[in-house]
Image (cartoon, rainbow, N blue to C red):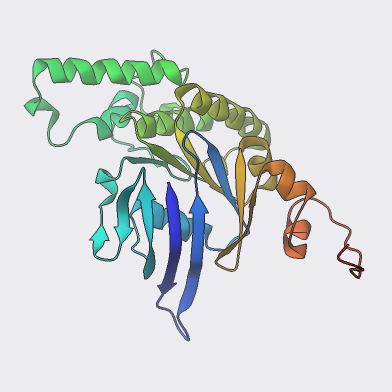
Amino acid sequence: MTVRGVSKTYAARPAPVRAVEQVDLTVVEGSFTAVLGASGCGKTTLLRVIAGFDQPDQGEVRLGGRLLTGPGTHIPPERRGIGIVPQEGALFPHLDVAQNIGFGLVRGHIASLSRRARRDRATRIDEMLELVGLAGYGKRRPDELSGGQQQRVALARALAPDPEVILLDEPFSSLDADLRAELRVEVRELLRRVGTTAVLVTHDQDEALSLADHIAVMRNGKIVQVDSPHGVYGATNDPHIAEFIGDAVLLPARLIAGR
């Protein structure tokens, strides 16, 4: 997936707000990429543009060479082949677990499906329940689940249609520290197993460093560094990033002969 020259401005008073500005990002197929930044840096706006919820003022988004967003083109979210796990899961409270997971597997009313299509849908739901460790939970309601179980259901719902990319919008932020650490390891291993390309949006440095293959650090609407976790932490190219990621001791220095 590629993002090229994406900018987005929101109308506001007393002046418009430029949320993202000339953002370029390449996400390698099958990789786990984290977009890391403080609150207000533009990372959620970038996710919304990729998902198709917002249209940028300029720039383009491509997935596998297919233009999703660009001049004269805007593919709606449901036709992009992109799954999303929103903050706090956002499960449908009136649907049971199986119905939540199967929500994206069919358009229109389930009663209109053929017997074979209904059987295939039920099989896929069972596969997803098994995948996230919730076999036998299909008839439970969201309010009968723990926070961690709800997040697993949200992940299963996003993966059920077999998307090309899955977007995770700070999915662990509402969980307590111990459960958050446990669940993010589970999610990482699960995504490796199924081979789905993933983009995580987070303000949590530990989360990004421990989960991602690549980290894109955002500040003031721009991506200021893209590197491996080791590169972002150990070879920071920006003093603000150094202060944001871990504890930093900044020493003034002067280059002599280019060194």
177 shown above or below 27: above
Q: Residue at x 45, y 24 (%)?
A: 194
For residue 106, side relative to residue 225 (left or right)? left
Pick the residue in front: 153 or 147: 153
Pick the residue in front: 102 or 251: 251
Q: Residue at x 13, y 36 (%)?
A: 108
List the single residue furthest toward the front: 257
List the single residue furthest toward the bottom: 14
What is the x, y in percent for residue 191?
50, 28
For residue 209, side relative to residue 89 (left or right)? right
159 shown above or below 89: above
Pick the residue in front: 240 or 231: 231
What is the x, y in percent for residue 15?
47, 84
What is the x, y in percent for residue 12?
43, 79
What is the x, y in percent for residue 101?
32, 28
24 shown above or below 157: below
Q: Quadrant of the C terminus?
A: bottom right
Instruction: Judge whether residue 77 can be spotted in this image.
Output: yes
- Number of labels in the image equals 0
Image quadrant in which you'd find residue 207: top right
Instruction: Judge whether residue 134 can be spotted in this image.
Output: no
For residue 225, side relative to residue 145 (left or right)? right
29 shown above or below 257: above
Q: Residue at x 36, y 46 (%)?
A: 63
Q: Residue at x 25, y 60 (%)?
A: 73
